[in-house]
Amino acid sequence: MNPDLVTTLRGAGIQPSAQRLAVAGYVLTTEDHPSADQVLERVQARFPMVSRATIYNTLNLFVDKGILRQLVLAEGKVVFDPRLEAHHHFIDDESGRIEDVPWEAVRVGDVGRLKDYEVREYMVVMRGRKLGGSRGKAEKAKR
């Protein structure tokens, strides 16, 4: 049992059970942005008896208690993000991988100037192709 996860769950007012700790052990520590089905697959690899309903209920509980964010970054695709601090996202067209982009790396206009809107939160979701490694250097050299 991971004492940090127990502390995190208790601090959020969640009673740590074996199933909740199994879900937290993956979803609160990953750099990925998994869907509920991906969480189910990962947790069932270690705990085959955990049900789909338990996964969905646990993820919703974590979101309700504020220790996990639920994001809809593409139509019909819900993912979960353990990073609660402000940041943006980049979705690679080729792989579908979602990556975190530091908040300060993207400059956004003053949302406070929007009339008739009370903005509670915002983020930029970028889509494209990640340039990296030798392919990235070759693409940059073409410019």
Image (tube, grey):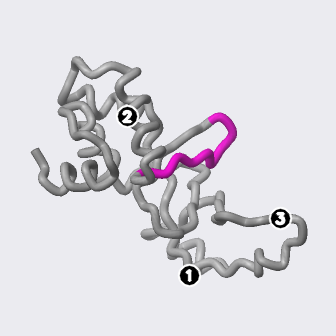
Percent of width and height locating residue 19: 24, 31
Instruction: Please name the amino acid that badge 1 sits on.
Output: Glu
Front residue of 140 and 21: 21
Under circle 3, the secondary element is loop
The residues colored magenta run 68-76
Mark 2 closeness class: few <14, some 14–19, many ≥20 residues within 10 Å? some
Q: Nearer the viewer, mark 1 or mark 2?
A: 2
Marks 3/2: CA–CA distance:
33 Å
Q: Is residue 88 above or below residue 93?
A: below
**Residue visible at 37% across and 29% down?**
55
Q: Label 2, on which residue?
A: 58
Q: Nearer the viewer, mark 3 or mark 1?
A: 3
**Residue visible at 89% across and 71% down?**
115
Q: Residue furthest front?
A: 13
Front residue of 111 and 78: 111
Q: Label 1, on which residue?
A: 104
Examine the residues drawn in magenta and state their main secondary structure.
strand
Q: Label 3, on which residue?
A: 117
Marks 3/1: CA–CA distance:
23 Å
Instruction: Please name the amino acid that badge 3 sits on.
Output: Tyr
The tag earlier along the polypeptide, 3 or 2, is 2
Query: Is residue 70 rendered magenta in the image?
Result: yes
Mark 3 closeness class: few <14, some 14–19, many ≥20 residues within 10 Å? few
Under circle 1, the secondary element is helix
Q: With 74 as the anchor, is 25 left or right in this view?
A: left
The tag earlier along the polypeptide, 1 or 2, is 2
The tag earlier along the polypeptide, 3 or 1, is 1
Residue 1 occupies quadrant: top left
Residue contact at pointers 1 and 2, CB within 8 angstroms: no
**Residue visible at 44% across and 33% down?**
36
